[in-house]
Amino acid sequence: MHKAAKVYAKTALATGNPRELEAQLLLRAAAKLQAVKDGDVTADDGIESAIRYNRRLWLVFADAIGRPENPLPREIKQNVANLAVFVLKHSMSIETSTEPATERLGVLININRKLAAGLRAKAA
């Protein structure tokens, strides 16, 4: 199991509320990306770190959603899988582009924030 997945699983057990944990992780990733977009992080390694953190998070989501024991309805699984594919492709596009990353991060930030808000709304 990937190191990030192990940390996720361990923390999920400790918190007892997987939706809240997922929301927190999405918001943390969004904050890292927002710092890049706002110019607070300008070093190449900081930019790459923020994008890769988000990408790893979405890889964990994609892995979890694809497991047969996942109890979510098929439609939700498909929607999350589609988002994961988009996020992964967009992230790779940003990393390999010669254009400034800051111009293309907004969509990733919005996806993370909207999904986090949805997770929190359903938990309430």
Image: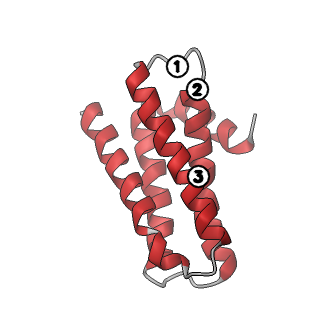
**Residue drawn at the location 41% of the way across and 53% of the way down:** 112
Pointer 3 with pointer 2, Cβ within 8 A: no
**Residue drawn at the location 40% of the way across and 19% of the way down:** 73
Q: Is residue 110 left or right of residue 50?
A: left
Pointer 2 with pointer 1, Cβ within 8 A: yes
**Whole-number angstrom distance, CA of label 1 to CA of label 3:** 21 Å
**Residue drawn at the location 58% of the way across and 26% of the way down:** 66
What label sits on residue 70 in the rendered view? Answer: 1
Which of the 4 image quadrants contains residue 23?
top left
Q: Nearer the viewer, residue 83 or 8?
A: 83
Which residue bears the numbered disc 3? Answer: 88
What label sits on residue 66 in the rendered view? Answer: 2
**Residue drawn at the location 67% of the way across and 80% of the way down:** 44
Q: Is residue 111 left or right of residue 36?
A: left
66 to 116, vertically: above or below: above
What label sits on residue 5 in the rendered view? Answer: none
13 to 73, vertically: above or below: below
Q: Is residue 1 left or right of residue 63?
A: right
Q: Residues within 10 Å of mark 1 (few under 14, many from 20)?
A: few
